[in-house]
Amino acid sequence: MVQASDPDILSDFILPSNLNGVNGSFFTFTGMRGIFNQTPPTFKVTKASLAEFPALNGQSISLAVLQYPAGGVNPPHTHPRAAELLFVVEGSLEVGFVDTTNKLYTQTLQLGDIFVFPKGLVHYQYNANATEPTTAISAFGSASAGTASLPTTLFATGIEDDILAKSFKTDVATIQKLKAGLAPPKA
């Protein structure tokens, strides 16, 4: 497995080429305003990464607010370019990751707990509470951590059904059912 990370910069910060100068506004991200006043119906991520916040260029850090409705899940996924530090600020979460020897590490987190997901490893989060939402904040050791969601990566990218069926030791009909479950609802 090959992994990469952000290169170190030789200045305090990096300005986009279309800017001649900056003030405090350049270093301020307002995209999180108002999100704590709502409970989304499905799992929701609000990111402050390089794509949304250009001041992060060269800083090797980014952040995301993760909102889980009751029973909500962030499916198994990886961040190929960064470790993740998750901080529970509301509710509780069941979390886990799988190391390179296929050992599963799990923990139930409560309000105020912090958990680290090592760089590049498959991990998940689940709000097992049937009635209350959960909110967590994740910090990443990269301005662009990247996310590869396993359900989407495996079943919604065009990998041939027979390859998936052989890989999972099942039949094509089962693979097609899994793919159908990931298809967007028809309007």
Image (tube, rainbow, N blue to C red):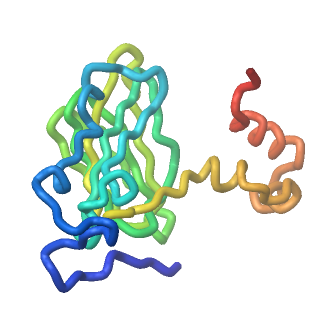
Corner quadrant of residue 57: bottom left
Q: Give the quadrant of the C terminus.
A: top right
Q: Residue at x 48, y 56 (%)?
A: 147
Residue for point 18% across, 72% down: 13
- Asked if residue 94 can be seen in this view, the reply is yes
Tell me residue 111's x, y (percent): 18, 33
| Image coordinates for residue 142, horizontal then vertical, percent | 31, 66
Q: Nearer the viewer, residue 161 or 107?
A: 161
Residue located 33% across and 35% down the image: 93
Q: What x and y, as percent, mark residue 7?
A: 31, 81
| Farthest-out residue, bottom | 10
Q: Residue at x 26, y 26 (%)?
A: 34
Q: Relative to 41, is 14 on the left or the right?
A: left
Q: Is residue 81 left or right of residue 34?
A: right
Residue most toward the front? 20
Give the camera-side residue of 71 and 101.
71
Compared to 107, does 84 lie above or below?
below
